[in-house]
């Protein structure tokens, strides 16, 4: 098994440490997880469809620690799970000379993720191409203290703004293509999470950001054997 494939799966939910505790589920050779951030401002799911292992559920409490432990291994690794009395207790990974034993958490300590079957209508559709993805990541790096981005559409012009305010501020404004009807009042979401979502899926050449005026944004990626969905909850500024 290639360690890189597991790393890619992890990066898509871990978001550089913004999400730590999740359940890994293996079903029909697909590795998947659902997650929610501690501040409840982002939730989502990630799957990898070429994971050759028996069906199981694993409690990963400290993803950062797992990544650091995996970092000592070569690219080609063996993957296995230790079970005691039918309960998964540790994750083992091994290359030709080194082995890693990562202790699994009880599933009861992993945060529950709300069911997203009932979603509002997404009345705003924004095209995100590779140029936008690169520009937004750069904009957030240039304004690291700006925690939110704001979408606004007025007079037929749609923009995503970091540093949006009714007063004069440092800000970066990016024009975007939008499918929306009429003017749209400013609506804000976490720029910190969006940046990490875009970084984690930087292989994507394009994506679509869907926004509901009821206060929810959704972005979906399909890249190789990976699928990822992210939902951002509106923030107040």
Image: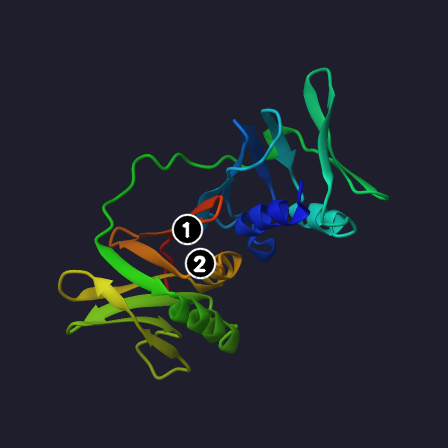
Classify residue 44 by image quadrant. Answer: top left
Q: Quadrant of the C terminus?
A: bottom left
Q: Identify the image's colour scheme: rainbow, by chain, secondary structure or one colour.
A: rainbow
The image shows residue 129, relative to residue 105, as above or below, that is below
Instruction: Give the structural element (helix, strand or loop) at label 1.
Output: strand
Q: Residue at coordinates 70% horizontally, 33% vertically from top-left?
A: 104
User: Crowding near pointer 1: few (<14 within 10 Å), some, many (20+)?
Assistant: many
Task: Find residue 151 and report its horizontal and vertical position in percent.
Answer: 30, 66
Task: Find residue 213 and report its horizontal and vertical position in percent.
Answer: 24, 54
27 relative position to 88: left or right: left
The image shows residue 51, relative to residue 152, as above or below, that is above
Q: Quadrant of the N terminus?
A: top right
Instruction: Give the structural element (helix, strand or loop) at label 2.
Output: loop
Contact (CB < 8 A) between labels 1 and 2?
A: yes
In the displayed orientation, state which residue is furthest to the top. 85
Q: CA distance from mark 1 to mark 2?
A: 7 Å
Question: Count of labels shown?
Answer: 2
Q: Residue at coordinates 59% horizontally, 57% vertically from top-left?
A: 16
Query: Which residue is more in the foreground, 139 or 237?
Result: 139
The image shows residue 59, relative to residue 225, as above or below, that is above
Find disc 2 in the rendering and name its residue.
204
Task: Find residue 61 and report its horizontal and vertical position in percent.
Answer: 65, 40
236 relative position to 226: left or right: left
Find disc 1 in the rendering and name its residue.
221
User: Crowding near pointer 2: few (<14 within 10 Å), some, many (20+)?
Assistant: some
Query: Which residue is more in the foreground, 109 or 135?
Result: 135
Task: Find residue 134 and report its horizontal and vertical position in percent.
Answer: 45, 70
């Amino acid at each position: 098994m290639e360690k890189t494939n597991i790393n890619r799966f992890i990066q898509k939910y871990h978001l550089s440490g913004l999400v730590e505790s999740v359940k890994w589920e293996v079903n029909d050779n697909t590795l998947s997880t659902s997650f929610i951030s501690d501040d409840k401002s982002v939730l989502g799911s990630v799957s990898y469809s070429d994971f050759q292992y028996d069906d199981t559920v694993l409690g990963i409490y400290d993803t950062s620690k797992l990544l650091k432990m995996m970092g000592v291994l070569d690219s080609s690794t063996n993957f296995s799970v230790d079970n005691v009395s039918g309960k998964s207790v540790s994750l083992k990974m091994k290359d030709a000379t080194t082995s890693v034993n990562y202790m699994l958490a009880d599933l009861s300590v992993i945060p529950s993720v709300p069911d997203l079957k009932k979603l509002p209508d997404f009345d705003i559709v924004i095209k995100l191409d590779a140029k936008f993805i690169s520009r937004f990541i750069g904009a957030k790096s240039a304004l690291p203290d700006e925690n939110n981005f704001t979408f606004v559409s007025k007079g037929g012009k749609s923009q995503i703004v970091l540093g949006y305010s009714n007063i004069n501020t440092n800000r970066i404004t990016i024009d975007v293509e939008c499918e929306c009807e009429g003017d749209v009042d400013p609506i804000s979401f976490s720029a910190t999470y969006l940046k990490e979502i875009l970084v984690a899926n930087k292989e994507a050449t394009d994506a679509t950001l869907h926004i509901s005026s009821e206060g929810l944004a959704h972005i979906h990626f399909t890249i190789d054997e990976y699928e990822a969905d992210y939902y951002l909850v509106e923030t107040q500024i």
